[in-house]
Amino acid sequence: KYIFSCQVGYEESFDDPDSLTFDSVEVNVEKSPIRASIRGGSRSVSELHYFAIDATDSVDPDFPDKPIEESPNWFFNFTCITPDGRPCFEEVLPYTTAQLPQPANCDLDMEETFQDVGKTYFVPLFPNAAGVPGTYICKYYVPGVVIFNTRREDALFGGSEYIFSVTTEADGRNATATAVITILEAAVSPPQVVIDPLTDSTVVATQAFRISGQIADQDKARFNLTSEPDSSIRRLQAGDEIDKSKPEVVYNWTIFQEVPNPKWNLADKAAAEKAGKEYLVPRSMFLMSDELTPARSPDAFASDPTNSRSLSLVPDVLGPDARYSFRLCVTVSNPYFPDRAPLTGCAQVSVQTAGPPPTMGSLALFVDEQEAADSSIYDSKTIVATDFSSSDTPLTYQFGFIRGGQKVNLRSNPIASPTQRTDALPAGNADDDYLVRIFVEVYTFYGVMTYAETTHKIYPPPTNEEKRILFNELLAEAGNRDPE
C-alpha cells in the first residue's frame, strides 16, 4: 500500500500551513496472478523411455524475465490420476491419493542425455527396486521438474492415459496446470510434437486466436525433415509419384471443450469422504467439439486445420469463461519401414477464455455532489459509473465524450476508479438542445469491454447580449422588491 500526498500553495506563503491546500490518495498494489504451465502440454510418449513433467515455463507476470530456477519462492506439488479416478502408481506403490510420493533428488548420469519436447535432460540413474518411489520418479535438479521412468514394465503401462497436474505457489499465489500423457506401446516411436508456448493461458474470445506447433527439432533429422513446411501440404493426386526422400507430413488440429464428467457423482464423493478416502474421479473432462470442425463451422477458421501447423480462429468463435484444449497431431511416413503404416505424434495444450463483458451498469453526472441533468460549462462535474461487475477483476474505466461523431477520452489510459472529476467537458450546441453525449468504457482484467452512454445538457457562457438582458432582468427584479 502506498500513500501519495500533495501540498499546493503560493510560493511566497508556502511556509504558512493555513495558506496551503493538502490532499492525499491511497493506492493498493496487488500482485498479479501467476500462470502455471507444463512444457509440451498433453502429448504421447513411447513406453520404455523417460519423460519429464516440466513446469519451468510457468510465469510470474510481475517478474516475467526471471527464470524459475532463480526464484526460491516457487513451490511445486505434483499429482497423477487415471481417467477413471485411480492413483497412477497404485499397482506398485502403497498409496491411495492423487498426490505423488515425495520424489527424491535424481542421481544423474552427466554424460548421457535424453530429449523431451525439444529440451535436453540428463538421464537419471533410477534404482532397480520394485515398490520404491525412487524407481519410478525423481526430482530433477532444476525446480519444477520431475522425471518419470517408463522403462519399468510394472508402472505407466503402454496404451494407457495418465492425467498429471502441477500446482505452483509463489508468494501466496497459486495456479494449476494439467496435461494428459498417453503412453504408447514400446514398438512405436512417434515423432515428438511441440506446441509453441502461448503468451497467456487466458485468451479473449472476442479476439482472433492463433496457435502453432511443429515436430521437435531432435526428431526432424530422424524423420528426414531438414525443413518442416510452415503451412499447407499438397494433397497427393492419382498418378503422382512419391518422393520418399521428402516424407509426406500431414497436420491435423482437433478442438476439445471441457464439460462435466458424467462419471463424477456427488453421492460417491460424500461416501468416499465419510470413509476417509480421497475421491479422485475428475469433475470435468474434455470432449471433442462437434461445432468447431471445418465441416460444421468452416467460417470459424482463418486457416485449414487439416493441413497447417498453425490453427487460426476468427473472433467470437470460442465461448466466454470456458476451457478448451487444442490437439495437434502430425503424421509422418515411417523412416525405417517406408512400406509400413506412418507414425503419428500428438501434443495438446489447454486454454481458459476470459469471462464475458462486464454486466451493464449505469452512468450519471453529478454537480456539487448532486445528480444533475444540466449544468453550466463553468461547473465542475463528476462522472460516476455504478453497478458494472465482472468476475475478471479489477475493472478499469475510460471516460469521455463524443464530439463531431468521434470519441474523445478524458484520460490517455483507463483508470481504476469508477468516478472521474473533470472540467474538460465542452458545451453543447444549440441545434442539439445543448446535449453532450458522455460515455464510459468498462474493461475487465483481460480487456473485455462494456460500453455505456448518457447525455447531459451543458450550457455555454452567455453572450454579451445575454449578459445585458440578464442584468436588466435582475435590476428590474430588485426594483420590484424594493421600490425605494
Image (cartoon, rainbow, N blue to C red):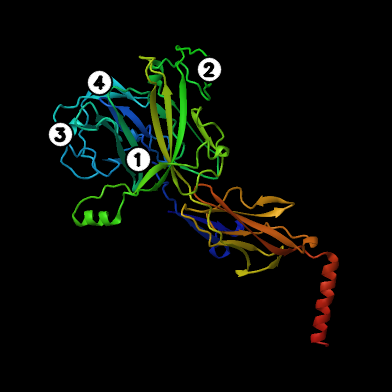
Camera-side mark, 4 or 2: 2
Q: Residues within 10 Å of mark 4 (few under 14, many from 20)?
A: few
Q: Residues within 10 Å of mark 2 (few under 14, many from 20)?
A: few
Residue nearer the viewer, 320 or 403: 320
Tell me if residue 147 comes above or below residue 100 in the rendering.
above
Camera-side mark, 4 or 1: 1
Percent of width and height locating residue 409:
64, 51
Circles 1 and 2 in contact, beta carbons < 8 Å: no
- Residue 172 seen by the camera: yes
Percent of width and height locating residue 299:
58, 38
Q: Which of the two discs, 4 and 1, labels the residue nearer the N terminus?
A: 4
Q: Residue 382's quadrant in the figure?
A: bottom right
Element at badge 4? Answer: strand
Give the Cα distance between marks 2 and 3: 57 Å
Point out the image quarter for the C terminus: bottom right
- Residue kind at label 4, given as amino acid type: Met
Q: Which residue is disc 2 drawn over?
A: 238
Element at badge 3? Answer: loop
- Residue kind at label 3, given as amino acid type: Val
- Residue kind at label 1, given as amino acid type: Thr
- Residue kind at label 2, given as amino acid type: Ala
Give the Cα distance between marks 3 and 4: 23 Å
The mark found on residue 217 in the picture is none
Q: Residues within 10 Å of mark 3 (few under 14, many from 20)?
A: some
Q: Residue at x 46, y 14 (%)?
A: 246
Percent of width and height locating residue 160:
28, 34
Give the Cα distance between marks 3 and 1: 25 Å
Is 365 on the left-hand or right-hand side of 306? right
The mark found on residue 132 in the picture is 3
The mark found on residue 110 in the picture is 4
Q: Which residue is disc 1 drawn over?
A: 178
Q: Residue 351's quadrant in the figure?
A: top left
